[in-house]
């Protein structure tokens, strides 16, 4: 029987803090992206978040916007994401990050069925808050729906997200878009403590995890981290160099090592 995303992450967090990279599908190119997936797999990522490029994001900062724009210029579509990933070789679980317009345009039931068949186990719809959870009820049959939570949420909201988020709880580290957040570890620790009393899944922190040392600090008060902008920024700065993929692998190893200690 296929294990759920939550079960896989729960088992992995017994040994180390969780590390979930984020990559924009199709950036810098589809062949390069597939190599990056393999590198994440080989370098000890616990899961991989794959972003579907979108022209009107609300949560993505300038780095992810740039990578999405460049992927869109290459003709990336949600259907192409599905068709490519169902052929991709990897062993780590996949989470798809997208926006409501894409899911509804594709069709909620069709989207979650197709992406589940392509190997995705978790779904993040960044512009669907807790109140829009009911719009994705059809997804439950195929995928675990992961909810985002802000650190300034009310205690009541923290409890509800903790109880209803599947796979893991995506805790946004502070105010701002991806890659540009000042993190207050004290505030973060307080929210994670509240979540631990009610959450049924691991608590991962994303936004503003810009270095391995920062990842270690944040993971000291959580179950792990999601790193996107810092990885994509490395590629943006180095993709013209011959050995940039070796450099990307080294950066992943540095994150993995920083998160190895419990």
Image (cartoon, helix red, strand yellow):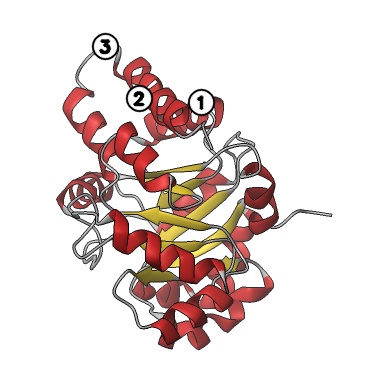
- Distance CA(mark 2)–CA(mark 3): 16 Å
> 167 left or right of 151?
right
Instruction: Tell me where residue 115 appears, x and y as whole percent.
Output: 57, 59
Marker disc for residue 242: 3
Reply above or below: 221 against 156: above
- Neighbourhood count class around disc 2 (C-alpha, 10 Å): few under 14, some 14–19, many 20 upward: some
Label tally = 3
Please tell me which residue lies in front, 79 or 33.
33
Give neighbour class at mark 1: few <14, some 14-19, many 20+ (Cα, 10 Å). Answer: some
Residue 96 or residue 55, whichever sits in front: 96
Name the residue located 46 percent from the left edge and 30 percent from the top edge: 256
Residue 126: in sight, yes or no? Answer: yes
Quadrant that contains the N terminus:
bottom right
Q: Nearer the viewer, residue 256 or 147?
A: 256
* Mark 2 element type: helix
Secondary structure at badge 1 equals loop
Residue found farthest to the right: 1
Q: Is residue 62 above or below residue 99?
A: above
Q: Nearer the viewer, mark 3 or mark 1?
A: 1
């Amino acid at each position: 029987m296929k294990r759920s995303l939550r079960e896989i992450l729960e088992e992995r967090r017994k040994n180390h803090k969780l590390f979930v990279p984020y990559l924009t599908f199709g950036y810098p190119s589809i062949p390069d992206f597939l190599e990056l997936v393999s590198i994440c797999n080989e370098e000890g990522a616990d899961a991989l978040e794959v972003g579907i490029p979108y022209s009107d994001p609300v949560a993505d900062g300038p780095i992810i916007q740039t990578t999405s724009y460049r992927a869109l210029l290459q003709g990336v579509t949600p259907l192409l994401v599905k068709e490519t990933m169902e052929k991709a070789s990897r062993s780590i679980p996949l989470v798809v990050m997208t926006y409501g317009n894409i899911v509804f345009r594709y069709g909620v039931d069709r989207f979650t069925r197709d992406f589940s068949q392509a190997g995705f186990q978790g779904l993040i719809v960044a512009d669907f808050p807790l109140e829009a959870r009911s719009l994705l009820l059809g997804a439950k049959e195929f995928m675990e729906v992961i909810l985002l939570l802000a650190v300034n949420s009310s205690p009541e909201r923290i409890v509800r997200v903790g109880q209803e988020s599947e796979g893991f709880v995506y805790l946004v580290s502070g105010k701002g878009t991806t890659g540009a957040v000042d993190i207050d570890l004290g505030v973060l620790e307080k929210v994670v403590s509240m979540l631990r009393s009610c959450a049924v899944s691991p608590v991962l922190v994303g936004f503003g995890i810009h270095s391995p040392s920062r990842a270690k600090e944040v993971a000291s008060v959580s179950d792990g981290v999601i790193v996107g902008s810092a990885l994509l920024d490395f590629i943006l700065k180095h993709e013209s160099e011959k050995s940039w993929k070796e450099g990307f692998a080294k950066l992943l190893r540095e994150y993995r090592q920083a998160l190895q200690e419990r």
